[in-house]
Image (cartoon, rainbow, N blue to C red):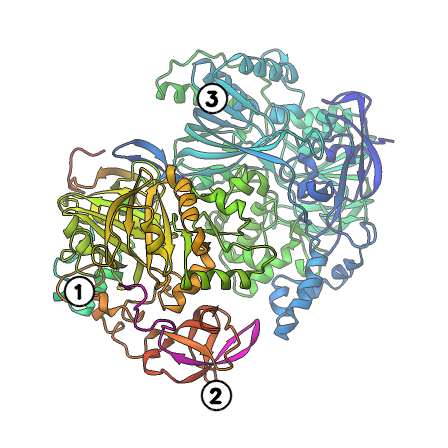
Amino acid sequence: MLLIKCPWCGERDETEFSYGGEAAIKRPLKPKDLNDKDWADYLFMRKNTRGLFLEQWNHSVGCRQWFLVERNTVTYEIISTKRMNSDALNSEDSQ
Amino acid sequence: MQTNRLNQGGFIDRHKTLRFTFNGQSYFGYQGDTLASALVANDIKIVGRSFKYHRPRGIIGSGAEEPNAIFQIGSGATTEAGMRATQIELYDGLVAKSEKGWPSLSFDIAIINDWFSKLFGAGFYYKTFMYPAKFWKIYEYFLRRMAGLGRAPKQPDPDHYSHQNIHCDILIVGAGPAGLIAGVSAGKSGAKVIIADDQAMFGGSLLASKEIIGGQSSEEWIASQVEILKTLPNVTCLPRSTVFGYYDYNFLTINERCTNHLSEFTAGKIRQKLWRVRAKRVVLAQGAFERPLVFPNNDRPGIMLASAVSNYIHRYGVIPGKNAVLFTNNDSAYQAAIDIKTAGAQSVLIVDSRSEQPSDMVDAAKKCGVELQFDAVIRNVIGNKSIKAVQISAYDASDNTCKDKAEKRDCDLLIYSGGWSPAVHLHSQSGGKNKWDNERHCFVPGKPSQASSSIGSCNGTWILEDCLKEGITCAQEMVTNLGFKAVDMKLPSSKKTKINPMMPLWQVIAKDSSENLPKQFVDYQNDTTVSDIYLAVREGYTGIEHVKRYTALGFGTDQGKLGNINGMAILGQALKKPIEQIGTTTFRPAYTPVTFGVVAGEDIDEMFEPTRKTAIHDFHADRKAPFEIVGQWLRPWYFPEDNEDMLSAVSRECIAARSSLGIMDASTLGKIDVCGKDAVSFLEKIYTHDVAKMAIGQCAYGIMLGEDGMIKDDGVMARLGENHFYLTTTTGGAANVMSWLEQWLQTEWPHLDVYMTSLTDHLSTIALVGPNSRRVLQTLVNTDLSAEFFPFMRTCKSEIAGIAIDLYRVSFSGELAFEVNVNSNFALHLWNLLMKAGKDFGITPYGTETMHVLRAEKGFIIVGQDTDGSVNPLDAGLGWLISKEKDFLGKRSLERADSLRKDRKQLVGLLSVDNKSVIPEGAQLIEKKATSGPTPMYGHVSSSYYSPILGHPIALALVQSGRNRYGEKLLAVSSDAKAIEVSITKPIFYDLKGEQQRVE
């Protein structure tokens, strides 16, 4: 069971969290300008990365905040967790 | 008569006699015995029949590795299946039955499988029972009976189980010499330590030996270490506790058996406990398993591992045989020969596959009168139900075969040892790899992948002094690392034994081909033989994971603790590859089987899931309404009067609501308060309709779509102020919708100034429904409820008897109706006031069933019943809700080619042609005429009821191109009813113009 550091509450068991999949999928600002293929890409296509992966988690039975987790999908190692509004990959104030 | 019991020795109390039964026969053992040691003491040779060939089998081991002595313990509700006799502590009155053997252990009819075993090679299930396919059910019945697996009790388990979460600095798995000294060393530094061992007593391998440690006997040394641990408040000792799972981030699970050793059932006490441990560091000191040797008929009763023999002698005062032959390829097994000779065996012969070399063990064996034969192997075993003799042949190490000439030696016990395999299970579960060690001929733990260390024999360290040294060093490093001050520990002295290297001997190969030899068993639990592995290779299986699945090697409840390494090495021989290229199969939790009871813990019955009751629940219960569980809520289903059945009650309730006045508890609706200066722009993105155009005080029916364009949830929402809204959701969807809204707000639009609060429990909702609802409500409120001031789809604040309320003129029945929201603390009081006020109009409480009938008569959908995640608003006939102007979640998806298909399933109404038959929900709709080939299925029935006001059945359905098929006739078919002819109509049956809910 993962031990996840909520950037608001600290380390908690995985059972307190829910998973939100791949992070940083930006919703198109003007969906109607997209053709079917591009819209389907946004809607359905996910990277399914092997290795370092940026994903969203929600502290659903805690503070209910969504936050970012950088995790290795092979080893399950969590590299860092960050608040949602911080710059995901380049921020210095990790955790 | 315990014929094999010694007069002295062992950790047993000869004054406390315990009676037990095995397969109906009574026997006696002593306090301190395991079931296995008591059976050996009573000279019980056959304890089970093998899985496939039903060969008689005896006890081989003395711990978690035991593959044969697997029993059903107890009877009735407290019976347990698949229990290893070697790990069951004896108690008075214990009842054990072998799981295989029919009609009896001694004569098992299925032994014919052994005689015809050529038919039963690896994969025989796949090859033999394939045809005809419909016969599988018959085959399965007999196969299961023959396989003789244990039986689960039919009654509920009366035992109590518990869970406990705990954090610690260091968790030590195994309290043998290495684990014990690591525990003392870490404990003295002040670190919070848990030390768990699956046995009743700490000490591990030392319990089965007579070592001298630091000048003390092993018994005294163990006692002194345990004493130190017990005095340290920061140390938790857990005997009878198996660490069975090692998961991510040093999370481990321990199964503690608290009262299993006392009796079959201990009322009022916790039977077993699941410890959920998060450890900063983990010390793995579980020890090692001795390997069997592989030779013809190596499964006969009376064959036992060397370590088990020492264990039975030293720990339980039991001698498993009088005339023993010991077959070994290593020095450690010599101890068993010495032990059994010293304990009083008449003759002991060691057959060693190696050439003679001087060693301490050879000298010691000779000194106590053990005979020795080198360069020799056992090539066959004589005796079926118990061992009578062995055949010994000279062994030629140069070509790895034994000579044809064999010499017979009578014996009643064959002891064997093929070396040791470290218990790398937990290390592997934690993600660590194992590496093959070519000197020690075993897999040893590689680099740990989590904060853990393997020490002692589970690290491949065999010498006691080295084990103790590893224990101290490991503990000191860990505590220092964690910021504690390591305590100086003196390494206790112990005997230094010179040991000769072992010889890898994976299989005794005779000059003639292994094909014609008697069976050589690799995995006892699954009857996997050497020839099965060769067969798998001949049939093209080369990977160990494939061979495992084809031959069932390592598939038993012992998970191959004895057989796996031999199996891998033999596969290596068959493929002519070194074992390091074969690799191991994956080790998974649980290390030994765990009961469902302890996994469930307290989370059963009413503790399984929370029950939610509305504030008005007591009224429903008083009226004896049956309850329906909806999203954890208990909702009244209908309110029977006198001896009414459901149909009469629902009919009465429906007619009352349509003709005069009904009242319903709608409190379970999801309720969300939304405010903030960006509330409008947020909700514009969420709902499909134009939220910005709503006037203050106006209500709207709104739907939310997923980004895929499918209906996600629906409900009435109201604008309470410029930037203040009140949303309702479906009962079941309340929590999901809230989470989903939060996700969009936090992850996509964090710049929006919006605040959301769930009011689901805070507010209760009472619906007053029917033509007389306004008249009755008006008697209680000062607000003018006339259509002029309070028209359909409006909300306002008001009060009843001094209680603040929110009024909504909305309708889920198609009738003139009002919903009253009130603080839940006042809800029951307000309900009673309304009941009183409506008395003269025959106010009738109704439940979810009537609610469903009323809404279905109007064609109002229930999300999740009439929709299923593949229904978009156009399919559901809700196109009128979709704003042309703005963007909202899912809008783009409504333009996708798939959404524009002409043959999408659309919501329609159905009428039974006979005007009588209620169509089963879930029925499939097909063509009336029989067609060749697969029958096209046009859709299914989603809602179906008898409509009391109309006097005939009605249904809603999703049908391909449904709106173009009004008037067409189809057949509704389901597995539990006759086919019903139906005709397709518009999805509305009553008050087609919708005048009643808008009544002036």
Q: Position of residue B669 (x, y in %)?
A: 36, 50
B854 or B554: which is nearer to us? B854
Q: Position of residue B941 (x, y in %)?
A: 44, 71
Is residue A47 at all visible to an observer of this figure?
yes
- Please give left or right for residue B698 compared with residue B157 in the image: left
Residue B931 image label: 2
Q: Position of residue B165 (x, y in %)?
A: 46, 30
Residue type for callout 2: Thr
Q: Secondary structure at mark 2?
A: loop
Q: Secondary structure at mark 1?
A: loop
Find disc 1 in the rendering and name its residue. B883
- Please give left or right for residue B841 compared with residue B596 in the image: left
Residue B333, quarter of picture: top right
Q: Which residues are magenta?
A: B971-1000
Find disc 3 in the rendering and name its residue. B193
Residue B993 covered by magenta stretch? yes
Q: Residues within 10 Å of mark 2 (few under 14, many from 20)?
A: few
- Of tags 2 and 3, the one toward the viewer is 2
Per the model, the C-alpha gap separating discs 1 and 2 is 43 Å
Q: Are marks 3 and 1 on the same chain?
A: yes
Residue at coordinates 22% horizontally, 70% vertically from top-left? B896
